[in-house]
Image (cartoon, rainbow, N blue to C red):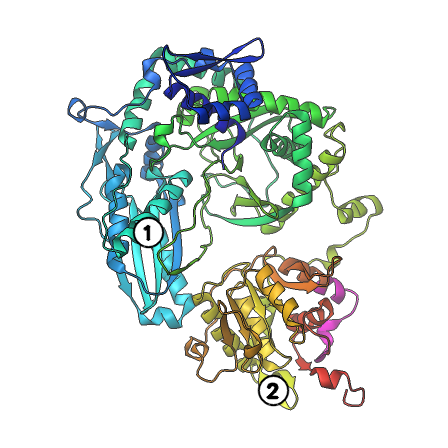
Amino acid sequence: MQTTFQKAIDILYAARQEGVEILLNEDKLQLKIDQNQEIDEGLLQLIRENKQLLIDLLSEGGWKSKNTSDEHDIIKPFDRDSVSQIPLSFSQERLWFIDQLEGSIQYHLPAVLRLNGILDTTALSKALKSIVDRHEVLRTVIAEEGGVGYQVVKSAENWELTLSVNELYEKDGGLLQSYIRERIKRPFDLSSDFMLRAELIKLAEEEHILLVNMHHIASDAWSISIIVKEVTALYQAYIQGNTLTLPALSLQYSDYALWQRQSMSGALLDEKLGYWKDKLNQVEVLELPTDYDRPVVQSSVGTMVSFNVSKTLISQLKDLSLSRGVSLYMTMLSAFKVLLYRYSGQEDICVGTSIAGRPQPSLEELVGFFVNTIALRDKLSGDMAFDTLLDQVKSTTLEAYANVEVPFEKVVEAVIKERDPSRSPLFQVMLVMGNTPEVPELRLDDLVLTSLGQELTSVKFDLTFFLTETPSGLTISVQYSTALYTPERIESMVGHYINLLTSAVTNPADQISRLEMLNDLEVAELTNGINVSNSSYPPGKSLLDYFQTDAMRNLDLAAVEFEGESLSYADLEERSNQLANYLISQGVWADSLVPLYIDRGLEMVIGILGILKSGGAYVPIDTGLPEERLNFILEDIKATLVVSSIVNSPKLTASCLHIIAIDEPDSSIRTQVKSLPSVKILPNHLAYVIYTSGSTGMPKGVLVEHGQLLDYIFGLNSRININGCSSYALVSTIATDLGNTVLYSWLVSGGTLHVFSKDTVSDARAL
């Protein structure tokens, strides 16, 4: 999905390619057409649909004066014989310098897929090799002469799909994950390596892991959608024994790099840099509060967490944006700047964002590093109304888009006189909204493909908020430096951001200093002096950490008892570890929703712990539910596997489900290693999802996070000493909150959990 004003820019360039110049005359659009030129009806429709958008961009940014239709605007293939050295693009040059100074694993673009079914390895290898051959940038290395890098395009002949076989990977999900992480982090040698690597790991005859890794110097998010689309088409053709000829590319990335160097130079570059020099003159460094001291040299170590914004709030934000004549991104940016203003106390706020950087249609089917970064600077004050800020941010954004062709690297050179090695130049915080085509689903004939997300371990900026619209609302994915911030700080910051958005929608005329940012508990703490610190949990620990401590201390103690049978802590630890490792091998990771359809008993507790240890969140489903309700929940969470038992499995009728019976004697679970998998659990990771009846009568999922559970347990313990208990009775179903709260009281404090069947619970004498 493109940002609003990137779309307008693309329309202007598309028109120019057709010999049509879009001009503005007294707030009205005019089309200047070459003699005897016919306008494509599709182009006309685009112009009609985006009329106001084009007027806004042309009126605010002075597009015509800054973007003429001179010959240098059109990118053409260059004569290879006339160029002795192909220069790097400005963006490539920056990454090349970074790679030489500190390495560049933070610029790797990995993808990991599980392939289930009959795979034609030869066809897959041929399809990927065809991509490398088709897009020169993927087989381009960087040579150096006199400290200046340049491109050298090599043949695709020696590219190959790496094949790996290790029978231990199928049995040990943790070992497989470790291997994948190591392969993803393996550095690229920019002077000799292909910029696309692919490795196929064979787990079984009909089960493989495909690991693809590219370097950002040769690719970007837009490029990924191109590669997926083309690999899908090529593989389908090759397995049928056909030859597929993809539409010829009119350009290669080297054509773009040479055009950029020639067009962005001399007087033209000086003219375009004028805007940025004025706009960013003496820009202030943003000093946000951090949890740790800033390193002398900027650290790239980081991670990413995601949060959801409701569909209702996003709908309200869209209505506000429409009424004010701004895009949704501008509204989100305005509230984001209020957040930074309130956190820092600074009025000079500069935030970065990225754009697709493909100024002409001929570049849209090309793989390469085109994305450009721009700085959006605004001056805020506490007495400024939010709707006034919206107008200002609109003007800033439009002006920036009208000067977007200048490479970010050139802007930095022109504005920053002395670099600070502890932080990125111009800005340290970014707000990015999806500006690339939606990545199509990779389809390889009848294979079932599952994406295995990998934990992010490196970042480029202190903070980057990625906004992605979803059918259920909007996702905020935050990449942050773990050298500066704790997970709790990020969770709090995002909560404050959402509160500001909610307040701005309700009262857009309010001064930005009066918009509500704190939640009810924070307000109560400030106004009433309520000390809630006694109920907060120790940072850096998860629920499972407490269980591990208990397990190691009480190996022979009965952990769970059910109708005369028991499991020791040692047995429970081993069996739940085996289940966790098996689930990881099946693609379960952080926040994966795993339905648990099982009667009360020892296996139920094994299932809960195993799912949690894998990083997933369990979705307990009462085995007494009607089939309609059961299927609704499975479909609602898009379940592909279910943890169950031999007795309950026959009730699961959906053919697409992989049913994992914990108590199956010959199950693959029993072949897994018994050691605890290496999975990092964060406070904002989901622990479980329970379904209530909902106001409409249909089940409705309620999400519960690890941090929320710990807050509850430690708050309870501050009032009732549950740590002194040696026995716990689980009498409620875990498909309700009550059952889970008892379970977690036991989990963090030790002792024996006594699980009672439905029949026993209904018989007072038996209890």
Residue 566's disc number = 2
Amino acid carrying mark 1 in the image: Arg
Element at label 2: strand
Residue at 42% from the left image edge and 75% from the top image edge: 673
Image position of 108 (left or right of 629)? left
Amino acid carrying mark 2 in the image: Ser
Residue 760 visible in the picture: yes
Label 1 to label 2, Cα distance in Å? 46 Å
Residue 23's disc number = none
Q: Which residues are magenta?
A: 713-730
Residue 186's disc number = 1
* In the rendered image, the vertical position of residue 350 relative to residue 437, given as above or below: above
The picture places residue 520, in percent across and down from the top left corner, at 78, 47
The picture places residue 57, in percent across and down from the top left corner, at 53, 19
Element at label 1: loop
Residue 406 visible in the picture: no
Tag 2: Cα neighbours inside 10 Å, few (<14), some, or many (≥20)? some
Tag 1: Cα neighbours inside 10 Å, few (<14), some, or many (≥20)? few
The picture places residue 649, in percent across and down from the top left corner, at 55, 78
Viewer-closest of 644 and 540: 644
Q: Is residue 586 magenta?
A: no
Check the image and name the residue furthest to the right: 528
Q: Is residue 726 magenta?
A: yes
